[in-house]
Amino acid sequence: MMKINAQIGVFVRGKKASKVNITVNVVGGGQMAQAQAVRTAISKALVEFHNDEGLKDAYLAYDRHLLVNDTRRKEQNKPYRSAARAKRQKSKR
């Protein structure tokens, strides 16, 4: 699944991608995060290499996350709390 996820950028426009040798090194994160990072890197590199607005539009129409990374991150824990939004449970007795 991760290999397919990483290669989606090549499958969307296979004709233009077949003319380029692609090598990507990824460090850190989980397996799915690395696959998504590879997917984004390949798509951005192909758009920049071919300098083609049609290719960019095709990627955006298929999946916006091929060209734009997901910016959501884990919310930080607040002081004196066990989780980001968890509050201390109150007793009624």
Image (tube, rainbow, N blue to C red):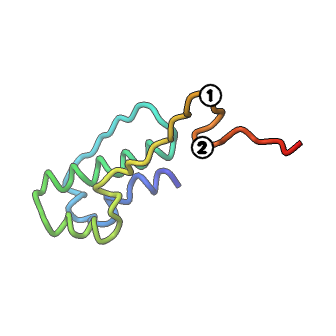
Mark 2: which secondary structure?
loop
- Disc 1 designates what residue? 80
Q: Is residue 49 left or right of residue 44?
A: left
In the image, what residue occupies the spot 35% across and 35% down? Answer: 25
- Left of 29 or right of it: where is 24? left
Q: Position of residue 39 (x, y in %)?
A: 36, 51
**Residue furthest toward the top?**
80
For marks 1 and 2, the one nearer the N-term is 1
Residue depicted at 50% across the width and 47% down the height: 32
Q: Residue at x 24, y 58 (%)?
A: 17
Of 67 and 1, nearer the camera is: 67
User: Taking 73 as reference, is 1 above or below it?
Assistant: below
Secondary structure type for disc 1 = loop
Q: Amino acid at mark 2?
A: Arg
- Disc 2 marks which residue? 85
The one nearer the camera, 32 or 70, is: 70
Q: Is residue 48 above or below residue 62?
A: above
Looking at the rendered structure, the kind of residue marked 1 is: Tyr
Graded by Cα atoms within 10 Å as few (under 14), some (14 to 19) or many (20 or more), the crowding at tag 1 reads: few
